[in-house]
Amino acid sequence: MKSIRRWLLGWLIFGLAVACLIAGYGIFHSARHEAGELFDYELRTVALSMPANIATTSGAEQREHDFKDLADDRIAIDIWDAAGALVYHSAKEPVLPKLSEGFRTIERNEYRWRVFGVQQAGRYVQVAQPYSVRDNLAARLALRTLWPLALLVPVTIALVLLIVARGLAPIGGLSRALANRSIESLDPVVIDNRVPVEIRPLVDALNDLLERLNVASKAQRTFVADAAHELRTPLTALKLQLQAAKRDALASSDARVIERLEGRVNRIIHLAQQLLSMAREDASHEKSMIPVSLRCVAEQSVSDLSLLAEAKQIDLGLDAHGPAGPDSGNDAYCVLGDEQALSILLNNLVDNAIRYTPRGGRVDVVLKRDTQTGGVSLEVADTGPGIADDEIKRVFDRFYRGASVKEQGSGLGLAIASSIAVRHRAELCVSNRTDGSGLSIRLSRLPTLPA
């Protein structure tokens, strides 16, 4: 995946490096040219300033003559008399051939030399200097010029890193804002004046997409709610007609057929009710939270489902453990939430527990309050067959039913409960009981009233 940050940093630093190399190359050649002009001037000065008394009849090399610091930089000096005989040659330097007047460049003994010759009265003076002296001086001059640039390079790279990071910060902030949004939130992304104008079209397009998704989501929820509501009325009427038919003195075979039809109608009615609950839950994710007595919700749920438990001879009970909570009507189990949604959650949990618990079993609804944190939790435990370990992670999927499930159901009960728990920022956990006697579903981390 291509990164804008890496692309910008890579090209900026590469461009800076290339510019520094070009600048260094230019500075070195400029320094070399200036050094060449300086040394050419020095060669000419030395040649014109040679003392007139330097002359020998034997042409022997003069080793100790004082030139008063005129030839400190490894300069080879040669002097010929009017007859063309070499009368002077500087010590330790190779003998160069006599060249014509002016500046010349020659190679001698694998060295390049800069030579200057001048004809004077009664003699010819020639001075030479190797190019290595000039290159060394040019390098020193270039280094003196480049060291501020060498210090400027890391400072410039640091500034580039800082500026790119600051420039891309709005994109990072927008990414974090979107990552922290709830999965159900379709509100427009709010931007301020700090967002660059280059990002505003992206944000506007994203808000337009969110608005269209919100419209489509509302239309879908409205359709599901309307369909469930419209289905419930004729199904209820059909059930009443079936019950009336059962009361008539029909043949036993017809009564069994009607009983099977009634079971199917009950299943369809339950599915319609679950669809209606799911649609309402999807549509109410922005509903405000108010203080709710979890004890009252649990008592109402146990009361509503007690007849279903008695029909299967299941012991359905409610237990409350923990000290008194904060002042909230002397209720130790007061939480912040949506009372209707919490009621649907608990009804689904208890209804599932009763459905899958064998006849003569036990279902316990347990309320607990933590003595240290003051948190409230709710647990529904049954003595049913439990759930296979490889299927527990999928029990919250919509319309999912385990392979070994024989009881009738829609596969929406736990999905609705999970959606309600997420909206309340609570945690819903499903696990098999440690003693192997059934299933335990625990709702914890419910928001409570401040102390």
Image (cartoon, helix red, strand yellow):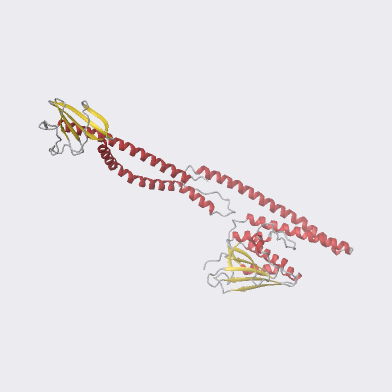
Residue occupying image coordinates x 30% and y 44% = 147
**Left or right, residue 161 beside residue 139:** right
Residue 194 horizontal/vertical position (percent): 45, 47
Q: Is residue 271 above or below residue 34?
A: below
Looking at the image, which is closer to me, 236 or 14? 14
Residue at image location 25% in from the left, 37% down from the top: 134
* Residue 245 in view in this figure: no
Instruction: Name the outermost residue toward the left.
Output: 53
Residue 422, given in percent of the width and then of the height, sits at: 60, 59
As drawn, 117 above or below 422 = above
Quarter where residue 72 is shown: top left
Question: Can residue 91 be seen in this snapshot?
Answer: yes
Q: 311 above or below 280?
A: below
Residue 379 screen position, x and y as percent: 63, 68
**Nearer-the-camera pick, 349 or 242:** 349
Residue 347: image quadrant is bottom right
Residue drawn at (46%, 43%), measured in percent from left and top? Answer: 7
| Percent position of residue 359, x then y | 75, 71
